[in-house]
Amino acid sequence: MESRPLVVVGAGAAGTAAAIEAARAGAHVTLVDENPIPTSIVALNVPQLFGQRFSDELNDSQLMTDCVTASNQRLVEAEEAGVDIQLGTCVWGAFNNTETSRLLDGPQIGLSNYRRSWMVKFDRLIVATGTRDLSIGFSGWHLNGTIGANGVHSLITRYRALTARRMVIIGSGNLALNTAKMALDHGIDVPAIVEVSPTLQGDASLATDLQNRGTDIYTSHTISRAYGRDGEIESVTIVEIDDHARPITGTEKTITADTVCLAIGLTPNVELLSLLGCDLSFNADLGGHIPIHDDAMSTSIENVLVAGDAAGVHDAMALDPEIARNQGRIAGLTAAASLRTITDAEAESRISDIPTIPFAPSDTQNLRQKWFDSFANAGGHNIYVCPCEEVTRADIVGIHPPRYLEWRSNQMDGRSLQTQLQDNPVNPNQIKRLTRAGTGTCQGRHCREQVALLLAEESKTDVSQIPLSTYRPPVRPLPLSVLWPEDESEEIRNQWPKWFHPPGKVLG
């Protein structure tokens, strides 16, 4: 098994800064990043919400590697600093000895280049995995063309492969406004920005610039439905809402568009941190569940650090990448000092020269709840919460089994979230087992926050009190042939029916 002194996961602003700083401090650093992602994985909307809006160029792996490298000049700087860079390599699992597992030969991660997988032990790990798009379902969002802001950014800047032509953007924070500007700069028409609040959420001057370029901004509005044929979005209907996020009759407007961009928020990618047992807490101002860490970016697990958006994201970071980059530099120096390639005093001196950039907390969670309510009020409760498993809001409230099982009974028909609440607090893991919401190919990235919001609403509790649904490896939907390339033995192949069917049972 391979062993590395320091592994940095994620080659964004924070990850590259961490790798460069640690390497310059004498540490042997391995930097891994899952991009470029194979088309087979991109089509599953993993990890970003890509919405099927990508061109055939993604099939050319070498071209995509060249694009990823060209779009991130920090990778050249990292290579010059001596960093071992492994692109197109995802981390599908992270493992640490716990009270229930003491057999591992030290902490390790599972890596894959989408053709094979292997394990790597590490002395220190910096998690700079960034964020994913907050997904909240509206009527018609299962159609091709629903994409996340991170997905737009990645397809434009990293892959140069976005095929959208006319895009309606949902949300008006800096994330949404920057996405609109980027789209316009690359020749994509942006006819409308839709905001559920009565006031603009992002930079006013940027919004004015967008309006001067022909983009209308609709405040106190939500999306009612996306329409299309042959599985593709062709138009979007928006509607004005009242103070209770309910649609106002007669205010509907239909806009021709082939793409709807969800830019209503970002959620930190904490899968690996959760798997390693890092303490997480809910912070509404920083995107949801985030790792508890100190000023040196060290988590509750001694050899694990965090940096960038994975440590918590806020709207100011959409305008200033230096916030994430500075966190990465601090994490890199902290890791180098713990590996004894630099003295604690030298690390502290360098860290003291790194500026901290304050930010103003925002009312993130209430805004997310308002989006959630407005989509339901405008589109009804038969909206998919979990598109992978085709689970609707009504299915979750009624705790219905997966519809493809075609399995119903009087006992199950009498069950609901309210009856469950009479027995014990509702837990997302329990709902996952009963409805399969969160078990599909995206592994809960589309529905995790929606389920939590729905459970909070039904149980009349704050969403911060809803436990985080657990993560299990693999956290990327890799084929079994990649995770375990060996074929089954002849004995297993011959005895398979016998092991799964008792003697005397007729197979059929």
Image (spheres, rainbow, N blue to C red):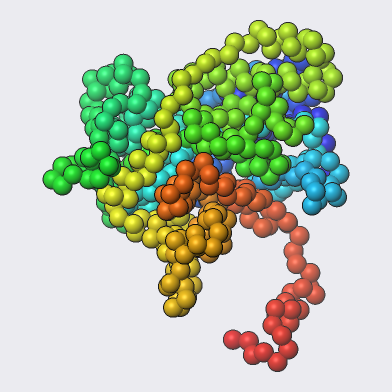
Q: Is residue 50 left or right of residue 36?
A: left
The residue at the far front in this view is 422
Q: 501 or 289: which is nearer to us?
A: 289
| Rendered position, 458 above or below 20 | below
Can residue 477 be seen in this snapshot?
yes
Q: 367 or 426: which is nearer to us?
A: 426
Q: Residue at x 62, y 21 (%)?
A: 327
Give x and y (percent) for residue 250.
13, 45
Q: Residue at x 22, y 45 (%)?
A: 247
Q: Is residue 15 left or right of residue 339?
A: left
Give x and y (percent) for residue 396.
44, 59
The residue at the far left in this view is 250
Q: 166 or 429: which is nearer to us?
A: 429
Q: Is residue 25 left or right of residue 12?
A: right
Question: How many dots with numbers?
Answer: 0
Looking at the rendered image, the quarter that the N terminus falls into is top right
Give x and y (percent) for residue 252.
17, 44
Q: 401 or 496: which is nearer to us?
A: 401
Looking at the rendered image, the quarter that the C terminus falls into is bottom right
Query: Can you tell which quarter of the image residue 50 is in?
Result: top left
Give x and y (percent) for residue 315.
45, 25
Can residue 191 be seen in this snapshot?
no
Q: Is residue 293 left or right of residue 465?
A: right
Q: Residue at x 24, y 23 (%)?
A: 211
Q: Residue at x 47, y 73 (%)?
A: 412
